[in-house]
Structure formats: structure tokens, C-alpha cells
Image (tube, rainbow, N blue to C red):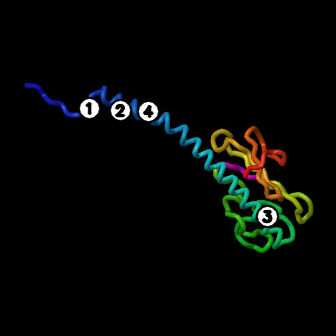
């Protein structure tokens, strides 16, 4: 009499594992590209928020803010204005590092903001730049500046 064994053979399990690995090899690079695109979109949105907050701060306080932290919480008149969230006012958000540099004054009459990927090629590909003009510019080969390509 023959025993009937229940379960899967080794060949069947190897085929299933191979199929899963093929699917993962296709899906993971697409996931990473999607994550970088999302980080870049977040960086552009953050730069827009910084531009808006800077103009609001300038209107209320008579000059552009002295730092990113001055635009963040908590609200204390013209010392900290609570115009952007606490994460962004700390200088890093969604895989990008933001550097705000006021100029002129005091109070500041101009400013520049750069956004660089925290880990280039992993958290983002493009570098961004904006200033008091409100135009956001991008560069994929290195740090963005006033001569970089404007984005829409």
C-alpha cells in the first residue's frame, strides 16, 4: 500500500519563489522611481510654501524672515510666525534638505532657498532653487541656482 503525501514538492516551491522574485525585480525599481517623484513634488510644494510664508512675514514684519525657523511654530509675533510646519522649519522634509539664506538689511530685503536631495539618486534626482521672485528652478546635474531651468 502506498502512502499519499500531502503538501508541495520542492520543484513546485522553487517555481513559486522564482515567480515572486521576478515580480519583485519588476516592481521594486518602479516603486523607488515613484518615491523619488513624490519627494521631488513635495520639495516643490515646500518651496512654494516657503515663498508664500516669506511674503506674508514681510508684509507683517517689514522684511523677509531671518531664518526658516522664524517662519515656523510657535507664533510669537515677528520672532516665530507659525507660517510653515515645524518639520519644514527645521530644514528637512520628505528626503530633501532646505537652506534659507536672507540677504540685505536687516531686515532682509531678499532671500534665496535651495532644496537638495538628502541622498542624491535615492531620495531625489533634481536640485531646486527659488528666491523672492517666486520662480522655482530645477537642475538635475548639481546644485540649482538663478540660472537653472524654471519649472511650471
State the residue position of label 2.
16
For image coordinates 66% across by 59% down, the residue present is 87
Instruction: Identify the mark at residue 21; answer none if there is no mark.
Output: 4
- Counting residues from the N terminus, which is met first, the one under dot 4 or under dot 3? 4
* Residue at disc 4, secondary structure: helix
| Residue at mark 1 | 8
- 105 relative position to 151: left or right: right
Q: Which residues are magenta?
A: 95-99
User: Considering only order in the chain, which callout, 2 or 1, is on the residue closer to the N terminus?
Assistant: 1
Left or right relative to 62: residue 124: left
Cα distance in 3D space between marks 1 and 3: 64 Å
Question: Where is residue 114 shown, x and y percent of the image?
Answer: 77, 50
Which of the marked residues, 4 or 2, is nearer the chain's N terminus?
Answer: 2
Type of secondary structure dominating the magenta stretch: strand
Q: Badge 3: how crowded within 10 Å, few (<14), some, or many (20+)?
A: many
For residue 54, the mark is 3
Q: Are marks 1 and 3 in contact (CB under 8 Å)?
A: no
Residue placed most toward the observer, 53 or 85: 53
**Pointer 1 or 3: first along the chain:** 1
Relative to 124, 130 lies left or right: right
Instruction: Reply above or below: 104 against 33.
Output: below
Which residue corresponds to the image point at 49% horizontal and 35% vertical from the top-left? 26
Q: Do the residues bearing badges 1 and 2 touch, measured as CB atoms within 8 Å? A: yes
Please count the marks in the image: 4
Q: What kind of element bears circle 3? A: helix
Q: Secondary structure at mark 2?
A: helix
| CB contact under 8 Å: marks 4 and 2 | no
Residue found at x 78% / y 50% = 129
- Real-space Cα separation, disc 4 to disc 2, in angstroms: 9 Å
Amino acid at each position: 500500500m502506498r502512502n499519499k503525501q500531502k503538501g508541495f514538492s520542492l520543484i513546485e516551491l522553487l517555481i513559486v519563489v522564482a515567480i515572486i522574485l521576478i515580480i519583485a525585480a519588476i516592481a521594486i525599481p518602479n516603486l523607488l522611481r515613484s518615491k523619488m517623484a513624490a519627494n521631488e513634488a513635495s520639495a516643490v510644494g515646500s518651496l512654494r510654501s516657503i515663498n508664500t510664508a516669506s511674503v506674508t512675514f514681510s508684509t507683517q514684519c517689514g522684511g523677509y524672515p531671518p531664518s526658516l525657523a522664524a517662519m515656523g511654530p510657535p507664533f510669537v509675533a515677528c520672532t516665530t510666525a507659525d507660517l510653515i510646519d515645524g518639520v519644514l522649519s527645521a530644514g528637512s522634509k520628505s528626503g530633501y534638505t532646505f537652506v534659507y539664506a536672507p540677504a540685505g538689511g536687516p531686515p532682509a530685503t531678499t532671500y534665496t532657498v535651495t532644496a537638495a536631495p538628502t541622498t542624491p539618486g535615492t531620495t531625489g534626482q533634481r536640485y531646486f532653487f527659488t528666491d523672492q521672485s517666486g520662480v522655482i528652478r530645477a537642475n538635475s546635474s548639481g546644485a540649482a541656482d538663478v540660472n537653472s531651468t524654471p519649472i511650471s
